[in-house]
Amino acid sequence: MSPGNPSAGDLFAAGPGTFLEFCQKWCAILGGKVPGQGDTHDLISGLRIAAGLALFLLLWVWILIRSSRGRKKQLKAVNERYRLLVENMSEGIMVIVAEKVTFMNGRASQITGFSLHEITPRTLSEITGSQDGNAVKEAHRRIMRSEAKSLRLPIRITCKNGETKWIHNCWVGITWKGVPGVLCIFSDITENKKMEQQFLQAQKMEAIGQLAGGIAHDFNNILTAISGYGNLLRIKTDNDPGLNRYARNILACSNRAANLVKGLLAFSRKQVNDPRPTDLHDVIKGAEKMLRRIIGEHIEFSVIFSKTSPVVLADSNQIIQVLINLATNARDAMPKGGKVTIRTETVENPDASISGDNGERRDGRYALLAFEDTGEGMDESMVDKIFDPFFTTKEPGKASGLGLATIYGIVKQQKGFISVQTNVGYGTTFNIYLPLIDVPVETREAIRLAAHLRGTETILICEDETDIRNFIREILESNGYTVIEAKDGEEGIDTFRRYRDKVALVLLDVMMPKKSGKDVYDTILEMDPKVKTIFMTGYSADSLDKQGFGDSITPCIFKPIETDMLLTEIRRKLDEEKTVSGHTSHVTGKD
């Protein structure tokens, strides 16, 4: 230390006089007073300032601590809110790092069935369905290489229970704990996909229906001519077995072609439908002998009726068609024999697993028509397809694939629904539900009489197809009728005007050049209100409705025309009683 600046030890060693001298020197420099020589006010002031500074410091520290605690509490609340948001989202959330799941929320666990510790060891390709594996790998590669900021794609995943689900993914690249990864936000769209498939199926069915309706007219005209001349040939060759066999083969092929068109129309629900109050038991009894012949003697056949007769609003002919198709399928499923049982019941609010109808519950009273066989049965993968047109489990060329499609269309048109119960090796049961009604049953023939009813009346044929016109003329003339022809609507009106006193009945094609059959009918009705008419058409019932005909064209014979049906309808129309101006007239043809 320098001579002018003694240390503290030197000052105390020198004694009190030296210390006071030192204090006076430095107090003079600072402008203060030497402690101990005067007022202690400044010392107290200094102590107060020091105490204030200490108190301020303590207060500041307390404020910082309290603020820190508040921020921690606030941060905890924010974290809780975000946790609640993430855990309660309707979408699943996953974080994928190195192609493995490192985080997932509760919804993701609910969709996949996996917990976090169960899914963590799995790679992305193990979770994704095999059909979409390549698409997922490509999407992951693009995100990780920053070729895309985000990607959206629907994929299939395999859940813990083995179920395949559709999910819609949104992928975004993120950094997770300092490592590049992918944030995956997804929703379960399995039900949407099912609805989409049902919509596409409905569109497919509608397209088939439009196709069937489009070809029905021309095709049925052709079949009418083929079957008509085939019938004429059959009649003319009764004494020649060889030629007669050829004629019957022609008719058999014609009937197969006609049934093919009817099947398409039935499936698309555009075929002719004439629902009436019908006793289901009467329909089954009327078709029982025919069903026994179809099934064959090697198969046991039984019918179990409910105690009460169920009455439904349905077309009995179409119900018979359903039974025929089911019997044919059952026979083919039991080549070595088996058992077929038809059973009826009355059920309330049926709740069945309905193929194609989402298994929805139906309220009300229904008649159950159960058709059971002990055949080969089907696996679940087939059940979803059996009502598709052209789907068949038989060998190529053995079936058209329209049998069950036709059944489905008919049942739906009768306002009913159908369910299937089947297991491989244990047979199949088709449960058909038709709404019950509380009205009296109309007496109706289940099968038309095939008698050739003759007559001597004059009939006007208005038909633009020459082959059909010639066929009908030959049939009618061979059965005693007198025939007048017209090739279009205008000629039909002119011809009726000339021969109105002779014409007993007019056969009208619905669609003709120049004037339609409906226009011809309206015109000749003004000339003769008593005129009897029968319409003919090759169009589907749906096509006629769209063209504005509706129920105004009844009675109507739909092509291809069967000879026996044509003669029966003509004779019935000519013989029916008709009241005009309060008087009843009855016209009877000679046999």
Image: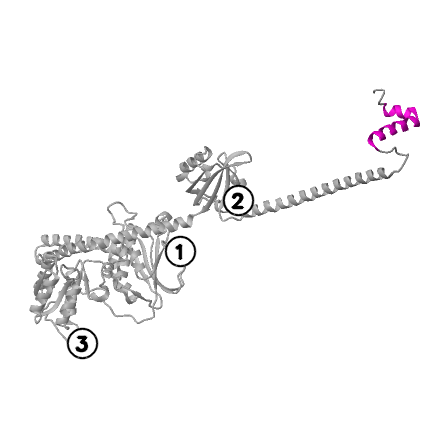
Q: Residue 327's spot in the image, x, y percent?
A: 28, 56
Residue at label 3?
579
226 and 232: which one is in front? 226
Spatial CA distance of label 1 from label 3 is 51 Å
530 and 306: which one is in front? 530
Query: From this viewpoint, is residue 375 visible?
Result: no
Q: Residue 229's spot in the image, x, y percent?
A: 11, 56
Q: In front of the other: label 1 or label 2?
A: 2
Spatial CA distance of label 2 from label 3 is 80 Å
Label 1, secondary structure: give it: loop
Label 2, secondary structure: give it: loop
Spatial CA distance of label 1 from label 2 is 32 Å
Q: Residue at x 8, y 55 (%)?
A: 240
Magenta range: 6-31
Dot 2 or dot 3: first in sequence order is 2
Q: Label 3 sits on what residue type?
A: Thr
Query: From this viewpoint, is residue 45 visible?
Result: yes
Q: Quadrant of residue 270?
A: bottom left
32 and 192: which one is in front? 32
Residue at label 1?
359
Q: Label 2 sits on what residue type?
A: Asn
State which quarter of the image contains the C terminus.
bottom left
Q: Residue 82's spot in the image, x, y percent?
A: 56, 46
Using the image, tell me which numbered label, if any, was put on residue 391. none
Dot 1 or dot 2: first in sequence order is 2
Outermost bottom residue:
582
Relative to residue 346, is residue 70 drawn left or right? right
